[in-house]
């Protein structure tokens, strides 16, 4: 089967950098994606890594190491509005349909 | 602006009732999905559809069925609602080649009493 592990909660201060880790176990791995969900809101797609390395989109970056079955989401210059839940999701087994992790609640303090 | 809409934001039903949750997308996406989200459990896939009248079971299909008669519309049906189906239900859509990039609706908070 599949499993994903990510921390349940991360706290940081405004302006800081935070890294949310995700480790996975699966067969037939295709890639790792990240979603953001604010309280009461819909999940929104942030990024997808199909290859090893770092993908940068503005203040957010996502990294993948296929050999280590590991990835992370890096958020720079944290803002209060970044307080949200962040989900990693793995696509594998003949389909790009993601299987979601349990989510990490990011709390940004002033 | 791309949009996925769900018929109700909040719904309260009684045990044993038949419940219909509707989802409509305006992006001409082939793929549509139904998830439920519970605290601490993330999003779990109930059913998905990759074309009109086609459906596939996800990870937790028991107690649910789906219908896709038109490309833009995907319905989730609870044949006989039970209290353990109290949850947030999220609909999503995607292009077939980019299933990892899904567009979600606002969700329906269903309470079964």
Image: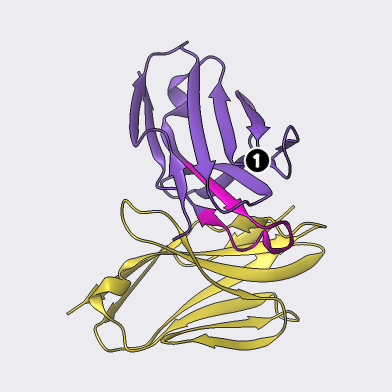
Q: Is residue A28 above or below residue B87?
A: below
- Magenta region: B90-103
Examine the rendering and report whether any part of residue B36 can be seen.
no
Residue B79 falls inside the magenta stretch: no
Q: Is residue A95 above or below residue A55?
A: above
Among the 4 quarters of the image, the one containing residue A54? bottom right
Q: Is residue A69 above or below residue B23?
A: below
Which residue does the image show at 42% across and 33% down from the upper left? B7
User: The residue tagged with tag 1: helix, strand or loop?
Assistant: loop
- Color of chain A here? yellow
Q: Is residue B81 above or below residue A106?
A: above
Give whichever of B77, A77 is nearer the camera: B77
Q: Position of residue B60 (x, y in %)?
A: 63, 36
- Color of chain B here? purple
Query: In the displayed image of the protein, which residue is found farthest to the top?
Result: B16
Residue B94 falls inside the magenta stretch: yes
Q: Chain of mark 1?
A: B
Which residue does the image show at 67% across and 49% down from the upper left? B31
Q: Position of residue B107 (x, y in %)?
A: 41, 43
* Residue bearing the label numbered 1: B71
Q: Taking B80 as reference, is A26 left or right?
A: right
């Amino acid at each position: 089967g599949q499993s994903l592990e990510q921390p349940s909660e991360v706290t940081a201060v405004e302006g800081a950098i935070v890294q949310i880790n995700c480790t996975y176990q699966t067969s037939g791995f295709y890639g790792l994606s990240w979603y953001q969900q604010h309280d009461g809101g819909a999940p929104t797609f942030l990024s997808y890594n199909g290859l090893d390395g770092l993908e940068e989109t503005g203040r957010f970056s996502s990294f993948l190491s296929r050999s280590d079955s590991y990835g992370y989401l890096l958020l720079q210059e944290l803002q209060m509005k970044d307080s949200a839940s962040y989900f990693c999701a793995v696509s594998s087994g003949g389909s790009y349909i993601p299987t979601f992790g349990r989510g990490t609640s990011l709390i940004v303090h002033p | 602006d791309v949009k996925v809409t769900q018929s109700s934001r909040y719904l309260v039903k009684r045990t044993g009732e038949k419940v219909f949750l509707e989802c409509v997308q305006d992006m001409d996406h082939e793929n549509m999905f139904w998830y439920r989200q519970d605290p601490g459990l993330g999003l779990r896939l109930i059913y998905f559809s990759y074309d009109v009248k086609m459906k596939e079971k996800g990870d937790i299909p028991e107690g649910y069925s789906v219908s896709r008669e038109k490309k833009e519309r995907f319905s989730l049906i609870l044949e006989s609602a039970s209290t353990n189906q109290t949850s947030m239900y999220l609909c999503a859509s995607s292009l077939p080649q980019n299933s990892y990039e899904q567009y979600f609706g606002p969700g329906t908070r269903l309470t079964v009493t």
